[in-house]
Amino acid sequence: MAHNEVALAERPVPEPGPRDVVVRTTASMMCASDVHNLSGAMAVPVGRVLGHESVGIVSRVGDAVTRVREGERVAVTSVTPCGCCDFCQSGAPQQCGGGVGGYKFTTQQDGSLAEYFVVPDADFNVARIPDELTDEQALYATDSMSTGLAAAEQANIPLGGTVAVFAQGAVGLSVTAGARLLGAGTVITTATRPLNARLSAQFGSDLVINPRHEDAINKIRDVVGQHGVDCAIEALGTHETFEQAVRATKAGGTVVNAGYHGWQATGPLPIPLVSFGFGMGGKTIRAMLCPGGSERLQRLFRLMVNKRIDPTPMTTHRFGFGDAAKAFDLLASRADGIIKPLITY
Amino acid sequence: MAHNEVALAERPVPEPGPRDVVVRTTASMMCASDVHNLSGAMAVPVGRVLGHESVGIVSRVGDAVTRVREGERVAVTSVTPCGCCDFCQSGAPQQCGGGVGGYKFTTQQDGSLAEYFVVPDADFNVARIPDELTDEQALYATDSMSTGLAAAEQANIPLGGTVAVFAQGAVGLSVTAGARLLGAGTVITTATRPLNARLSAQFGSDLVINPRHEDAINKIRDVVGQHGVDCAIEALGTHETFEQAVRATKAGGTVVNAGYHGWQATGPLPIPLVSFGFGMGGKTIRAMLCPGGSERLQRLFRLMVNKRIDPTPMTTHRFGFGDAAKAFDLLASRADGIIKPLITY
Amino acid sequence: MAHNEVALAERPVPEPGPRDVVVRTTASMMCASDVHNLSGAMAVPVGRVLGHESVGIVSRVGDAVTRVREGERVAVTSVTPCGCCDFCQSGAPQQCGGGVGGYKFTTQQDGSLAEYFVVPDADFNVARIPDELTDEQALYATDSMSTGLAAAEQANIPLGGTVAVFAQGAVGLSVTAGARLLGAGTVITTATRPLNARLSAQFGSDLVINPRHEDAINKIRDVVGQHGVDCAIEALGTHETFEQAVRATKAGGTVVNAGYHGWQATGPLPIPLVSFGFGMGGKTIRAMLCPGGSERLQRLFRLMVNKRIDPTPMTTHRFGFGDAAKAFDLLASRADGIIKPLITY
Amino acid sequence: MAHNEVALAERPVPEPGPRDVVVRTTASMMCASDVHNLSGAMAVPVGRVLGHESVGIVSRVGDAVTRVREGERVAVTSVTPCGCCDFCQSGAPQQCGGGVGGYKFTTQQDGSLAEYFVVPDADFNVARIPDELTDEQALYATDSMSTGLAAAEQANIPLGGTVAVFAQGAVGLSVTAGARLLGAGTVITTATRPLNARLSAQFGSDLVINPRHEDAINKIRDVVGQHGVDCAIEALGTHETFEQAVRATKAGGTVVNAGYHGWQATGPLPIPLVSFGFGMGGKTIRAMLCPGGSERLQRLFRLMVNKRIDPTPMTTHRFGFGDAAKAFDLLASRADGIIKPLITY
């Protein structure tokens, strides 16, 4: 199997280290990041298992694990911090060990798109799934919905404030839902694909702009006033959407970058100078990664159990594990209106 | 008097509007921003009085002013918010009315480098100078020291954390002092000019790097470890120092931009992608402007009265008002080791 | 008219000072605080006009007012900070001038339950009412709904977190709505009166407890676990509900006090020691007052225009101005299921 | 050995569990909490080893420990969170497992005042001591100095703001040093014992009040104005100092409770109503416990290595381990001017 190919591979069932558990997978989702990993921006060794969105049944438990038990039905966050290092202790567990280091599946160890997978530091990263939730619902809490909600959480949205979200893929749609959950007074989104636009409205957007047909910045200013929105979130990972997010935001406002800018890396990310007040405009720009940890999983589960949010309309495709490569190809080509594919085992 | 020339001009003593006071100036300082204003990045009409760092005696008081009295010896912040608009009410008074709008002297009205000047919204922006302080000390609280301290305040410095400050002009030196005042455990600075380097150590730098002789990033990593500092502050306004600040900061850390990037504007401000974790590195970048307001002035005065900070070693030159143009030329050419020139009337 | 009596009084139409406007009232609401003012806890001189929840048409504009115009249909916050003093500049405008000083209507000047009333510092405190909103809706943004929302904002609710609200009067019901608007995963409330209990569920409570029939703390722990809720809000102003709020909150959680404890003042407010971890339990207790200011009013208006919240089911009674004393008596006796009475002119 | 007696006991060298390390103690300090534990407020079983401030050499390492090595010279925080539970993951590691649960030495397991002791969750709680620091210095970072600094960190001190600290024992003195490290403009303290008063000035107090000779509140108001200080910290654990801290604080300010209120528990902790604005005064009261974790230890070590703080003047007495009971008696009786006793092995 050469680089840049995806294939099924036969592997032995893994053994857990003392802080690990092994999970027998019952369902997975795929993520644009899996595609990005293949594009070469992050170094992934040949033969590495992909995937970081899986749920299943705990099959083996490491000797030092105290909070997880064999046979439990669990979800695992896509980002799996150790909980102990300087980064974890100082409020940046996503950066565990440094430099996006909390993102371990695929980049530091085999991923979870497999019949069995190892969860590092399981006491930190594994949460039981409540009986009220399906595997499909729980999967959204492991990555894409959690990322979008976290972007909204970091956007410092004033109660009744104005928010713009650039792009409405799985993360962007979750930002939209998150902005509504967190009290935004007006939410404006951009989407080009028809299904994404429809879901955007369904998830809480007050106005969905198609940036191919309208100038998004002008339209946003028409609605919220010339100074722009309180908060803007970039959810695609292009220079263009990043610049728009900075330009759409009022002086003193917050820009959150939720997109991954590695897949088409073309030089530094550009901050437009005039919109940035030549460095004096009081704007804050935050780069972020999906949070990890069981405590967060439980809170997101509660949001679904108590009907605050339903991410399942984003599941556009369903495959058996044997057809995972097809799901991968669809995601890579963004064909057939795909948003999230569900893989069952 | 044509554009790009500085000259003394004869003017009538101004009248205060209902919310204004008129101050008879006793001392002023000049600032690199005055030079920048002349460079054309911000539109300044011909004939506009320069300057925004002045202290003096209240000479006339508008009818609606309730907190300032004729004859008081006062300082005025360089940024003069109205206190009432949406920006002022929502925690961004520097952006009063939108887009760096709190910076009114010179850009929206005559500046304060004059024998008399008008202070808008005086109830918000004027504070009595305690008897213990000289005019010279009080002037530092109006802009350069306040800006540097504010940059340190926004850097989210953990107690005992590590801080890098790029450039050690009047603002950068004040950042250094501020980082120490706010509990930094290690402060590393860069300075090229000998006096600035000496003052940097005196103001609290644990290590002053001359970036012409050493690679600043490498040196910083030697001292604090490969992950970099908790916080970095850019205090010059160049693409290079901005990029270095981002690169010097650890994942999850904070970068504050205190420099003005208009004077040599050459396209967007570049965020280096790898250091930014391709958008996932958890870094926060904050652009800022000097805070305004009498309440802050009083706190900065207290720091000087109680000997927490002494900015006066930064006063390298002294001129009478008649020689203000000479001070301006020195600042523009950065000649003779100038940091801050004091102008007396 | 002696102390502790409410009566209609004939007065001249007031003149505005330079920073004031005079509003011709079109609608008012009454508040439990009006009753409290009469109970003697705060010193109110005989003859003082009551009321602090009114909307109307701007009738006269002071000379130094720049942001409000004659003839505009406006709302005025119940708390009217100056925007300039040390308290206002340092993030505590409710405490304008010190000690609950932002609460000026009735305590420092005539209230707004009158055909005409003076608004101090009008540039800060007056906002136009959008055409989409009725007077009744706008009135909720001036005090009771705003107070409840602010309590929720200060409760530091984690996304998907658990919240308990003690008492469901107009403020408590607004806390409930606010907890939902701000992403609470579970909201539990206590209410004794049937209408309040029904509205509580309608406004977003997942479980309404009648504390006369069940032990609220036990019931809360049954639902959220023995450690208690992330946040609890006291919305009545009794020792008992305050103690319950502290006890219901988990270690490290936040307690917000939204109730006024003056009307039955019986010694210091008691923090239960064991629940407080003998001072080591990491709990935060915040006392608060309704925020003032036009910027907030606009955000609350946006929440209503965009259908995020509808407070009008709390309007249980309607009176003409001539019958205001009846409304007052009903409120004082808490009779006839009264929550909020609307007064029209 | 009956309850309420302290004695030396012979024990086997303990075995570490998989996440633990065993440390051979080289030095310890004693703390007022050890005395409190004996007073019966917290249930401590007979035979339990006391102590939670120790440093030493790592002697045995559990199988799942990855960040600590045998033979390292280390310090251990007095509070030892697991790093994994819901409390640890949500920013309250001191409350690990609930209800002050991070405080494990003595209350949940044997303490560290012993020739060998077990550290739970060693990857989280153990840090190497830099060569530049003595055992004595490192000990201060494990509890008393760390607690005092944490109280200052939670006090939300504005740069140049005013701070009052009630009581100047080891924790209170550290609060004083912390307030200075964090930019306080004026620090006022109360102390009754002469040595503590002298050290208070040495550690940064601008004014030391003897509350036996002067009314502390009146004196504070004389200095900072009638509204009181921005922040007050209670560092003794009595009703009286708590009430004073609330009264000394201005409306909108912050009160931090650093003292332990169990040792003389006499009913609920009283919040004075008038100073609390009857619940509307905008004050925040925070209860806290010493933070745990290696990352914090490292930052506090840096403060000492780089000469920002020197806690060693608080070491008033030195004993060999065989005389530990004498140290205990001195602490219990507060005799001979004792502040901190150092125990060597």
Image (cartoon, coloured by chain):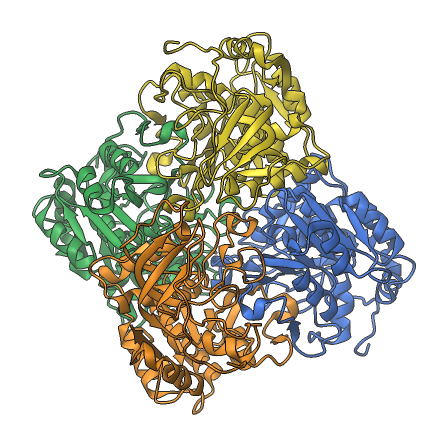
Chain colours: A green, B yellow, C orange, D blue
Q: Where is residue A126 in the image (x, y as percent from the top left)?
A: 39, 60
Figure check: D215 above or below B134: below
| Residue at 72% across, 35% down | B131
The answer to whether residue A325 is left or right of residue B72 is left
Q: Position of residue B124 (x, y in %)?
A: 51, 42
Figure check: B343 above or below C309: above
The answer to whether residue A114 is left or right of residue D77 is left
* Quarter containing the C terminus of chain A: bottom left
Residue C235 in view in this figure? no
Residue C204 in view in this figure? yes
Q: Nearer the viewer, residue A275 or D267?
A: A275
Give residue A335's quadrant in the image: top left
Q: Position of residue D137 (x, y in %)?
A: 75, 44
* Quarter containing the N terminus of chain A: top left
Q: Position of residue B37 (x, y in %)?
A: 41, 19
Instruction: Count the labels in the image.
Output: 0
| Residue at 42% across, 9% down | B5
| Residue at 32% across, 44% down | A106
Q: Residue furthest bottom?
A: C213
Give residue B27's quadrant in the image: top right
Q: Which of B144 and B60 is in front in this view?
A: B60
Q: Which residue lies furthest to the right in this view?
A: D336
